[in-house]
Amino acid sequence: MATNNDKHEIDMFDTIFKQNERRIHYHIHKLHIQDPHNEFYQEGLYALWKAYETYEPTKGPMATYFNYTIRNQLIDMIRKRNREGENQEKIVLEHKTQTTDGNHIRKEGSAVDLQHMSDILLDDTELWQNLQHYLTDKEWNWIYFYIIGNMSVKDIAIQENTTENAVKSWGKQVRKKLRDPAFREKIAWDISL
């Protein structure tokens, strides 16, 4: 049950709200915020209420305090959204990296890990020499260290003093070449990818 004091407090805030609602819209506009669902407006309204409850007249004008509180609350919300977006991007990138790390080939809709393909004969030196002849040094490094040496992409990047993305790119280039029937014929590699 609301007391007279609670009703008076609500009426006072209602008056303050009517006088200061434009401040919320002003700061949303000033900060170039797109707010189709009024989430920022609601946050500004909450900030106005918070400022109203915590305002101390001895510390300065009420309008200044309202502006300060609303603006900072909106900026905090923008920062929070940006962090959430960055975290989401990291999760998506990590998932993409794990599923397409440059060491897989696509065959009939599924990924096949190159290092575990039983068709690759590690002891066929003629095949490997042929392959090395037609690859760049970086592509050969990927074959040599990842396929033959069974090293991780991260370890190769450290050894070659480059980024993991660069190593993955080498793997993608090798896969692209190995998918080409003319290239496989050139190196006398008679397996179907």
Image (tube, rainbow, N blue to C red):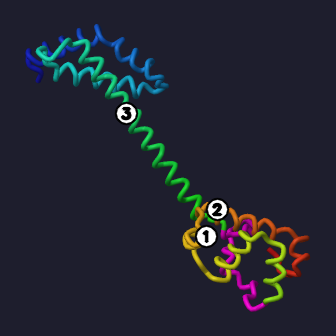
Q: What residue do we see at 55% from left, 69% from top?
A: 158
Say which of 189 and 20 sits in front.
189
Q: Residues within 10 Å of mark 3 (few under 14, many from 20)?
A: some
**For mark 1, what is the residue?**
160
**For mark 2, what is the residue?**
166
**Is there a contact, CB below 8 Å, between mark 3 and mark 2?**
no
Residue 27, image x and y in percent?
Answer: 39, 19
* Marks 3/2: CA–CA distance: 36 Å
Dot 2 falls on a residue whose secondary structure is helix
Give the vertical position of 143 relative to 64 (above or below).
below
**For mark 3, what is the residue?**
77
**Rendering quarter of residue 39:** top left
Residue reaching furthest to the bottom: 123
Earlier-in-chain disc, 1 versus 3: 3
Disc 2 marks a residue whose amino acid type is Ala
Q: Which residues are magenta?
A: 103-124
Residue 157, image x and y in percent?
Answer: 58, 68
Dot 1 falls on a residue whose secondary structure is helix
Dot 3 falls on a residue whose secondary structure is helix
Q: Which mark's residue is nearer the viewer, 1 or 2? A: 1
Q: Which mark's residue is nearer the viewer, 3 or 2? A: 2
Q: What residue do we see at 16% from left, 23% from top?
A: 54
**Is there a contact, CB below 8 Å, between mark 1 and mark 2?**
yes
